[in-house]
Image: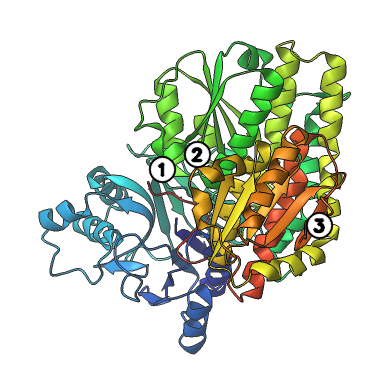
Amino acid sequence: MCGIIGYTGRNEAEGIMLDALEVLEYRGYDSAGIAVCGEDHQVRIRKCAGRVKDLRSLCERDGLSGVCGIGHTRWATHGGVSDANAHPHQFGGVTVIHNGIIENYKSLIAQYKLEEKLKSQTDSEVAAAVASHFYNGDPYAAIRKTVLKLKGTFALGIMFEDIPDVIFAVRNVSPIVVARTEEGSMMASDVTALGQYSKDYFVLPEFHVATLKKESVELYDMSGEPVEPQWLTVNWDVNRSSKGGYPFYMEKEIMEQPQVIRETIEPRMKEGLPDLTQDGIPDSLLTECSQICVVACGTAMHAGLVGKALMQSFVKMHMDVELASEFMYTDSLVDGKTLVIAISQSGETIDTLEALKYAKRNGAKTLAIVNVKGASIARESDYVIYTNAGPEIAVASTKAYTTQLAALYLLTGRMAYARGVFDEAATRAFMAELQRAPEAIQKVLDRREEIHYIARRILNAKDVFMIGRGMDYSILLEGSLKLKEISYIHSEAYASGELKHGTIALITQDTPVIAVITQDKVQSKEFSNVKEVQSRGAEVILFMKENYRLDEDASWDSVFKLPQMRDEFMVMPVSAALQLLAYYVSLDKGLDVDKPRNLAKVVTVE
Ligand code: AGP
């Protein structure tokens, strides 16, 4: 969490950094700040609690001139949301921006007697103070000694006042990417902030120091030996990082889904069959395992639940789906016969990364489904399937989720084929249905105004229930998370057959119920469950497969008919409908859809 940026070059740094911080704001938006090295070699800071727009106003009133600077947008961990706790932090002649957590900051305060000298309550200022303590003109020695003292995760951008126009970067776990542009050098938490300046970048290896100068970028290991960076190319169009005329990124990202799902599926299809050779995934990986386990968080974990239903019903394989944050603490049983799949949009979620490392230590084979190229989880895994969703900026995940689903369908298809569960005809039929998903989603998107109308029915609700069975329940868990995080309405997804075992006590005329019915084998039971909540006075908003017939005796408040696919693929159109529902509730409540309170897009703290 937290976004960091650094620029040194021929142009004024302030505007470049403010623009980049706006792009990075999805990583945290409690406060923002920049430091710029002026012509007189003084490093000056502007920072404030609030958003980057507040910092921009501050800079408009009292700007900073200079061609080298570092900037930060914060998600608060240590120390409240205040001007003083905003980054950058300056101690002596050292100025620092930090993403991560310095776990031993208290003992460092004691060891270096910093108690009376610090101006903030942050762990980050302590890193600046320790670097200042060690600095005697040799930046590399100071950085090396500092990082040896730090326990925890960190991505640090550092400026030394007597080394003008040079930025040093070092990291452990928390990400930093570095790029050369036509007229300078840049670093950032992720490539989306750099995309408009350069397509070529490298991921700063852990415990290496990048030195950014106007004319060059240098990379050294901790012993001071030069290292050749491994350059990568940005794999998406920079225009995809803009809102493209939509009021919020979330709407744009929902609307992009048919295209990005196609872009995830099509390169992995050969003559109607799933083909993972471009990802370097051998069939042996899929045939030699005896169980599968997904580790993931939030939305990515919900994608895993759909994957579990697919694997069990088509491949007849046992699959667990574990919350990555719990995985290591529940004595999870994985071994050399387990295929562990880590799913992550950002590829940086620390819980997922740590769970993956745990799985590797226990001998499991690992496969990552990741969106951001070169991210830590991708690099840590034996194999990677990249989703081609392009940059996802809104905190609420939408297109990343459906492209993760697409990857899981591909994997299921290939696995069933490789293990001989599907013959060629069955595999082709499965893949043909997957190829229909973008069209089914598009049909829902084309009717978004109907969903906008329906959304008004829950605008003032305090609590909402979402009910369904089987795969309908899996997708409702995601729909419910979406509604909670961006509308602040308490919402609970419930397996509808389970309601009568206690929770139905909460259903009254004041608790709207959203029901999803798309699974033929449980259809009649799902309709019965809906009647049960209607009998308790609940207003029911129903999303159902278009060929189902409604009981004419019952009265229906709102019904949205979903384009028909095979049952196992209905999650695709349903997810688009539930994303739009949450979006319109948040929009009509006048909330900041893309930046819901207390959240950040990339969760790099445990
Ligand atoms: C959902 O809308 C959230 N953004 C969140 O649950 C997210 O899916 C989770 O934090 C995992 O992130 P990742 O996919 O980047 O690992």
Q: Quadrant of residue 458?
A: bottom right
- Nearest to the observer: residue 530 or residue 437: 530
Q: Is residue 495 above or below residue 452?
A: above
The image quadrant where one finds the N terminus is bottom left
> Do residues under tags 2 and 1 come within 8 Å of each other at their CB atoms?
yes
Q: Is residue 121 above or below residue 295?
A: below
| Mark 2, residue position | 376
Residue 520 lies, in percent from the top left, at: 78, 35
Residue 539 lies, in percent from the top left, at: 67, 62
Residue 248 lies, in percent from the top left, at: 67, 67
Residue 440 lies, in percent from the top left, at: 84, 46
Numbered label attached to residue 173: 1
Q: Nearer the viewer, mark 2 or mark 3?
A: 3
Q: What whole-number distance in Å separates the C-alpha atoms at marks 3 and 1?
A: 38 Å
Answer yes or no: disc 2 within 8 Å of ligand 1. Answer: no
Q: Residue at x 35, y 76 (%)?
A: 83
Q: Amino acid at mark 3?
A: Leu
Colouring: rainbow
Q: Residues within 10 Å of mark 3 (few under 14, many from 20)?
A: many
| Mark 3, residue position | 445
